[in-house]
Amino acid sequence: MKTARLFRMAASGSASSPLLDGVFGINKPVGMSSAQVIRDCQHHFNPSALFKPMIDQEAATRARESNNRRKRRRFGKDDIRVKMGHGGTLDPLATGVLILGVGKGTKSLQSFIDCTKTYETVVLFGASTDTYDRVGKILKKTEYDHITRTLVEEALKSFRGKYQQMPPLYSALKMEGKPLYEYAREGKPIPREIATREVEVSELELLEWYEPGTHSHYWPAEEATNFERSFAEKVWKVEKDQMSSKKLTPEEEEADTKARDEHENFKRKADESVDALVYDRLNKRKRTNQQKEVPLMSGALGEMPPAAPKPGRGSNLIPTTSDTSTPPWEGKGPPAARIRMTVTSGFYVRSFCHDLGAKVSSSAMMAELCRSRQGDFVLGESNCMEFSDLAKGEDVWAPQVKEMLDRWNQKRDSKATPQSPLRAKQAKSPHAAQGSTSEQHGSADGPSPERS
């Protein structure tokens, strides 16, 4: 009886208002994972009047489910939420355009992963980290007094156009079925060949040059262990050998691999005692009561907006720095540069920063990152809202979201593939009119990735 009443309420509520599907952009704040942005959006969208038809439709669908289907639903998935996804993750350190899909708009998100993107980054010279950014551990410090704007601008020439880019040390790329960062964390030998990606940089410009002592970008304070340094050096040696096209005979490679393995086993045992490394297996007992997301290389209607969500596990992932912090160097410190680039899919900005440091005979890390454009979505324009507007209530964010979704659907419909002459002739036939209408309505449910 209760289920039937729920179905009638949901059906009557969704019949009066159209469902909202589509894609829009939001300015992701620093320190938050892309997944946490989605969770915060759902916190505001789920009880809203704007998305009530979608919630009601899902309630009606679940009301028709069999008992077996309900039992098979995974634990924790009983609550009804606005269906959402993102079109390409942003690191917690990064800000800028994060494309979000709603409802059937999630089917179009794959096309944004493969599109070109524009980034602005701040490169800080003089040191490198295991994550290639300012939130990692210092692997090495190098001289930087010789670095000038002219030297950096000359080095940028080698990054324009197409080239083979190495992934970051702790990236999620898999080699022989195992993520590279797992080799790093577990101290296991890595395959000799590190997979590279062909990337293209169509635009690359140095926007601002910060002389030593004129900026507040600092290296991280935490130093890497001897073990972590040795692993990084091994990876960098492999990279250098590959990039210089150094080839070994099968016999030389076998002997080299054997020698590396023996040397690494010896160093690992020594470094374990020196650094007192604590492996994951020793921390399992502590994980029961505390879970922490590690940053990698994220109803009833009322007049008041829902309270701001408590910081989720994907919030506050980046340590803050202040102007009063003690610099980790003597004197004025290293220079820094703000650089803008337009790149193809698969490009690692942190790898670019790391490689730029090596190009100027020093080291470097990514201190800031902002994605200012992804496809047609541009930061500061009408198709990309501010994340802070969510907390201002539905009266503020709902008109923006509705306008962006409407604009997306209008653009999608304008790109619909025109009918062939034979198809058009069949559509004019009185016998085919009903079937044609059904087909056209069905094709409007969601654009294919190729058309978005």
Image (cartoon, rainbow, N blue to C red):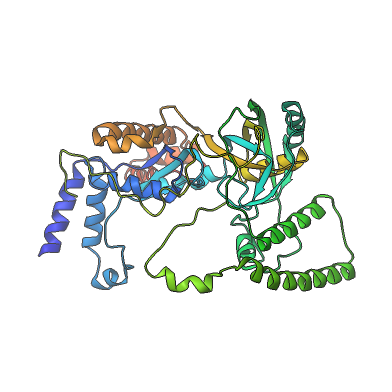
User: At x 46% / y 37%, what residue is drawn?
Assistant: 416
**As drawn, 191 above or below 428:** below
Q: Is residue 149 left or right of residue 137?
A: right
User: At x 27% / y 56%, what residue is drawn?
Assistant: 80
User: At x 11% / y 63%, what residue is drawn?
Assistant: 2
Q: Is residue 216 left or right of residue 30?
A: right
* Snapshot quadrant of residue 342: top right
- Can residue 66 be seen here? The reply is yes
Q: Quadrant of the N terminus?
A: bottom left
- Can residue 347 be seen here? The reply is no
Q: Is residue 316 left or right of residue 110?
A: left
* Snapshot quadrant of residue 347: top right
Task: State the image coordinates of residue 5 (x, y, percent, origin top left).
Answer: 11, 58
Q: Is residue 177 left or right of residue 156?
A: left
Task: State the image coordinates of residue 178 (x, y, percent, origin top left).
Answer: 62, 66
Task: State the image coordinates of residue 405 (x, y, percent, origin top left).
Answer: 36, 36
User: At x 67% / y 63%, what residue is drawn?
Assistant: 227
Q: Nearer the viewer, residue 440 or 148?
A: 148
Task: State the image coordinates of residue 260 (x, y, percent, origin top left).
Answer: 79, 68
Q: Nearer the viewer, residue 318 or 388?
A: 318
In the picture as drawn, the residue positioned furthest to the left comes out as 1
The mark tally for this picture is 0
